[in-house]
Amino acid sequence: MDVRLEQLPKDLNTCHQLIAELLDSVRSKQRQIDQLTHRLQQLLRARFGQKAEKIDPAQLLLFAQQILAEAQPPACPEPPEGAPAVQEPPAAARPNGHGRKKLPRNLPRKTVLIDVPPKERTCKCCGAEMTRIGQETSEQIDYIPASVYVVQTVRPKYACKRCQDGTVLTADKPRQPIEKGLPGAGMLAQVIVSKYADHLPLNRLEHIFHRHGLHISRSTMCGWMAASAKLLRPLYELMIRRVLESKAIHTDDTPVPVLDKDRSSTRQGRLWTYRGDQLHPYTVYDYTPTRARDGPMEFLGGFEGYLHADAYGGYDGIYAGDKIIEVLCWAHARRKFFEAQDTDAGRTTMALAYIRRLYQLERQARELFQRQPQGPDARSLSAIRLELRQAQSLPILKELETWLRQQTTGDNPVLPKSPMGVAINYCLGNWAALTRYAADGDLDIDNNASERDLRPVTLGRKNYMFLGSDNGGHTAAVLYSLIATAKRHGLDPFAYLRNVIARISDHPFNRLEELLPDHWKLASAAAA
């Protein structure tokens, strides 16, 4: 509104109306400035700021001292009557941060003997020959570069010189991972691990092999990856069936660029992760060309249980029935408050303090589980978490809900479209799904497990830039699944994949579960 001083009205009512319009215009401009400032701060934080969502403890005490009373250290459960008293283990000495760590015993040793020459072993006092009384041993790490070698398979031919039928006998050739293909199991495992675990694009692998004197094009290795995924697909599908038997599944998705050859550009595909529970310890990925709800709906078609996810609208159709129950993530809710700190420090700090108390109880449950005496009477983590959540988390959640609703009313209500208003509306609009974890000890407070599972994908796409096609997306889903599950069980992905690729062609289909990472780990330990 452009009003000159000499044009101001003389009537008082008209002046009041003009002032009201100007105040509304100022408020509108200020809201727009706050929103743009918030977006700019988010972009700067994403580009240059720290990723951890940490806040200053002094700030918490300033705004939320009444709810930040530290809980007493959790006490171990009382032992049953008649059971011997459990002595507390002695406190471990605090390391001073100095000194060299011992090298792992499983590494092979090469002994180098540096002895005193025989001519110098004569005593300078009496001239007698000295006697060996001990030795000094030191260790250092050395490295031998990876080597490429050729496996030459020889099959002798046999024929009868007396007969004229021309029969020639040779041993049957063992089945290969890729029929009539060059790569052996070790080579395939190396390329798979290098790309999908170490995030090396195939063009870099091409140069690495070239240094070894081996000329393999990236297109050839791309074909190897597709053939490996086809070979391992029965094992991948078995893992999917096991994941769908879980009581609770963690899921999330991330975009991956896919080459669109028709338009000579890239488009966005999606990789979804589905993480099974402790009784079904498998992590599988699924590729879809888009983020439409058809992808997760088809994948979870036979699932019944709890689904840990974010508030993506595509899941709404999945929750429509009674088979799949929504469990939302408190880490997502906390992030919205954290991002609103610059616009409303007082309210955001109070909300973050409440959420911090919830996470403190989860940490106490883990400490109780680890500190309790091991034995048949030991309580499960699920039972301990449920007890703490029912006794302490539920009252905190009730206080938080009351406080959040108070911020939307009163003399100074939060604006609905402000960053703080968006965070509050997100929590109140999804309150049932956010608090559902407190009613079951098998559920987690957040969905961070699936976000960690997607981290290798985000690291990989920065290096290999894009997937070559939708088929490349399905190939990546299979190979990522085998590597992620192997890592989940503490296995060396190369050793596991090399063994499985060499065996799976001749392995009986009805015993396919023997090749699952957890079964393979137990069998390898028993054999060792």
Image (spheres, grey):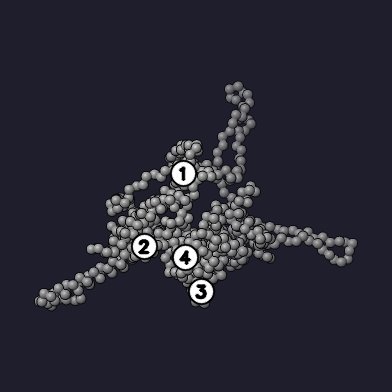
How many other residues sit within 10 Å of disc 2, few (<14), some (14-19) or many (≥20)? many
Query: Mark 4 or mark 2: which comes first in sequence?
Result: 4
The residue at 58%/56% (across/down) is 517
In this figure, which residue is indicated by the disc labeled 1?
371
Which callout, 2 or 3, points to the residue nearer the camera?
2
**Residue type indicated by callout 2:** Cys
**Residue type indicated by callout 3:** Asp
The residue at 42%/65% (across/down) is 311
Task: Let me know if residue 370 appears in the view.
Answer: yes
Gap between marks 1 and 4, in whole Å? Answer: 37 Å
Which callout, 1 or 3, points to the residue nearer the camera?
1
Which callout, 4 or 2, points to the residue nearer the camera?
2
Image location (x, y in percent) of residue 176? 68, 62
User: Judging from the image, what secondary structure is the residue with disc 1 in?
Assistant: helix
Label 3 with label 4: CB-CB less than 8 Å? no
- Farthest residue, direction top: 126
Gap between marks 2 and 3, in whole Å? Answer: 39 Å
In this figure, which residue is indicated by the disc labeled 3?
260
User: Judging from the image, what secondary structure is the residue with disc 3 in?
Assistant: strand
Query: Mark 3 or mark 4: which comes first in sequence?
Result: 4
Which callout, 1 or 4, points to the residue nearer the camera?
1
Gap between marks 2 and 1, in whole Å? Answer: 34 Å
Determine which of the numbered discs, if any, sits on residue 427 in the image. Answer: 2
Gap between marks 1 and 3, in whole Å? Answer: 55 Å
The residue at 44%/61% (across/down) is 327
Determine which of the numbered discs, if any, sits on residue 254 in the image. Answer: 4
Classify residue 222 by image quadrant: bottom right
**Residue type indicated by callout 4:** Thr
Q: Nearer the viewer, residue 256 or 343?
A: 343
Gap between marks 4 and 2, in whole Å? Answer: 23 Å
